[in-house]
Image (cartoon, helix red, strand yellow):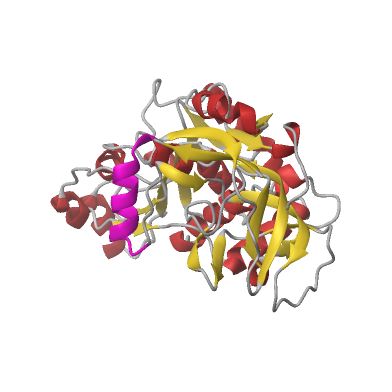
Amino acid sequence: MRAAITRAGALVVEEVPDPVPQEGQVLVRTLACGICGSDLHALGDPEAFADITRRSGGTAYDIRNGLVLGHEYAAEIVDYGPGTVRALPVGTTVCGPPIGFGPQGSGIVGYTPAFPGGFGEYMILSEAFTMPVPGGLDPRTAALTEPFSVAARAVRRAEMAPGSVAVVIGLGPVGLGIVAVLKARGHGPVVAVDFSAGRRALAEKLGADILIDPAVESPYDRWTSFGVIAGMTERMAAEYRGLRPTEAVLFECVGAPGMFAQVVVGAPVGAKIVLVGVCLRPDTVEPGLLAGKELDVRGSFGGSPAEYRQTLRDIADGRIDAGAIITGTTGLSGLADALTALREPDRHAKIIVDPSLDATRAPG
């Protein structure tokens, strides 16, 4: 099959062996695959990516050589491996969480040599995690179930009280997804923060109540107007009087060195900080501020099969407009240019890879 494979840190389109489904696996033809910010991080800083993966308990492979990336996918069933239930007919459009397992081991689809991702014409998926795409849903939109399920997990991890103020910092695809999930769950006000006017416009389309350009004003200057008590003394006084202060939840979706430290400084007392952006380098945070402000810091990563399934329903039923963030489509031959374009936030938010835009052939 044709695939964009990593060679010395670059993506090269070439012929590679067709994947062969083993026990409990399905062979599928890629219909659409989103380019994830994690792919950009991994290609841009492969050693740090591997180190973080290893120290987080994952299996790290050298991102620079021999991987077919792409874990946000929708595909068509072509064939089944042995020992499969075959509940879905050949030709069914499917998607699913990027979790691969079988006789060859387990791993994340697109980051494991045994499970090539959607930047190739064909993939093998675990039948147990393969879900049919509801009729009428564009495969390009279905492919975005994965990043929006990541957003759903972050919102669940926040455990927000009714009436909480949510501040989403960084409006890449996952940040935009968090805006959409928050509104679908009835939360508000939702404050969307990004330097990019284009991405702020997408956040507004997804339901954000307040848009902030940090080049113009700080997102940390409005706590009083939201009914949030920013200082410890004032909060203690409110508690002694039996008052329940409005909760603030900050979703850090940038994942760049310095952002976590900045959020800790800007957060009001008693706030929750949900780290969603994958920062690969150390940051400097003052523990005294974490303690003195009683900040609750939570990490969030990936999405479970249950969260993926619920997100797919939300998208199919129109509660979440995932397709709104798609700003471009490319074939495999244009993938390298697409990666460059995604580094310009006012130009693109999400680009979908469609291998059929290049020449294709039947597997075998």
Residue 115: percent from left, percent from top? 55, 58
Q: Could you say which is closer to the camera, residue 171 or residue 255?
A: 255
Q: Is residue 329 above or below residue 252?
A: above
Quarter of the image where one finds residue 96: bottom right
Residue 62: percent from left, percent from top? 37, 48
Secondary structure character of the magenta stretch overall: helix
Q: Could you say which is closer to the camera, residue 299 or residue 19?
A: 19
Q: Residue at x 72, y 76 (%)?
A: 84
Residue 354: percent from left, percent from top? 70, 38
Q: Is residue 113 above or below residue 22?
A: above
Asked if residue 88 lies left or right of residue 6, the reply is right
Asked if residue 267 shows in the view, the reply is no
Q: Residue at x 57, y 27 (%)?
A: 338
- In the rendered view of the protein, which quadrant contains the N terminus? top right
Quarter of the image where one finds residue 261: top left
Asked if residue 15 shows in the view, the reply is yes
Q: Could you say which is closer to the camera, residue 171 or residue 332?
A: 332
Asked if residue 339 lies left or right of residue 351, the reply is left
Count of numbered tags: 0
Quarter of the image where one finds residue 214: top left
Residue 46 among those drawn in magenta: yes
Residue 363: percent from left, percent from top? 74, 51
Q: Is residue 273 above or below residue 130?
A: above
**In the rendered structure, which segment of residues is drawn in magenta?**
44-58
Residue 229 among those drawn in magenta: no
Asked if residue 18 lies left or right of residue 58, the reply is right
Q: Residue at x 72, y 56 (%)?
A: 28
